[in-house]
Image (tube, rainbow, N blue to C red):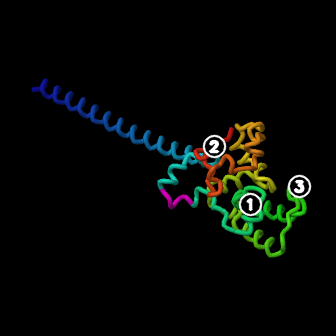
Amino acid sequence: MNKMHKAGLSLLFFFLLFHAGGNACLADDDCHHGDDSYQDDDSHHGDDSYHDDDSHHGDAHRHPENQSQHYLAPVTNPVYKETCGSCHFAYQPELLPAASWQAILNNTADHFGESLELDDDSRKGIADYLQANSAEKSGAKRAVKIMRSLGSQVPQRITDIPYIREKHHEISAQVFAQPSIGSQSNCSVCHKTAEQGIYDHDTVEIPR
């Protein structure tokens, strides 16, 4: 009887040991999974700060309600579009901060080597439009990243924006200088959907 009692206690001991070990393993798995999820979320969120604009192009198509936050708004002011678009691509106001647009309009006598003739009504209409829709007023991801890269800078050229330079750093000056492009400021030659405010990688076609 004593032997049976000891055998029973031994079996009970091993059962409890195995059961406790199994629970411990489950607890470790849960904790480890939780840590991984948290770290992955944080690291992905950190990457979002600068380089993820183009990676969500497909997501925006699947969720049209988010497009206004992803893409820049097309130019809608007819005076601005006609005045500026007659000489070069009519850039979206969201590509520069309000201070930059103001500096450009304050120096129309020497507009990058040209004289820009504007009557008072046209100047005011363009200024109001650019100020109301400038980069810092936009919720579009690209505009937010432009502002983040600028700091206190007030560039008058979009090609001087650090974020824009970073996005084009792999393209040589020789490519931009070829006759089919002309210069880096000629956005719509390579960005086929630039007029719609879409500058994603999968819409780029660099002419040869």
Residue type at mark 3? Gly
Left or right, 16 with respect to 193, comes to: left
Amino acid tagged 2: Glu
Q: Is residue 104 left or right of residue 55?
A: right
Residue 43 in view here? yes
Which labelled disc corresponds to residue 85? 1
Which residue ends up furthest to the bottom in the rendered image?
121
Residue 46 visible to an observer of this rendering:
no
The span from disc 3 to disc 1 (Cα, nearest Å) is 17 Å
Q: Earlier in the sequence, mark 3 or mark 1?
A: 1
Q: Which residues are magenta?
A: 63-67
Q: Position of residue 185 (x, y in %)?
A: 76, 50
Residue at image position (69%, 38%) is 208
Label 3 vs label 1, nearer the camera: 1
* Disc 2 secondary structure class: loop
User: Which residue is denoted by mark 3 in the rendering?
Assistant: 113
Q: Main secondary structure of the magenta part?
A: helix
Residue behind mark 2: 205
Report the quarter where the N terminus lies.
top left
Which quadrant holds residue 119? bottom right
Where residue 110 sits in the image (x, y, percent)? 89, 59
Q: For the residue carrying disc 2, how many other residues have a C-alpha within 10 Å: few (<14), some (14-19), or many (20+)? A: few
- Please provide percent x and percent y for residue 159: 76, 49
**Tag count:** 3
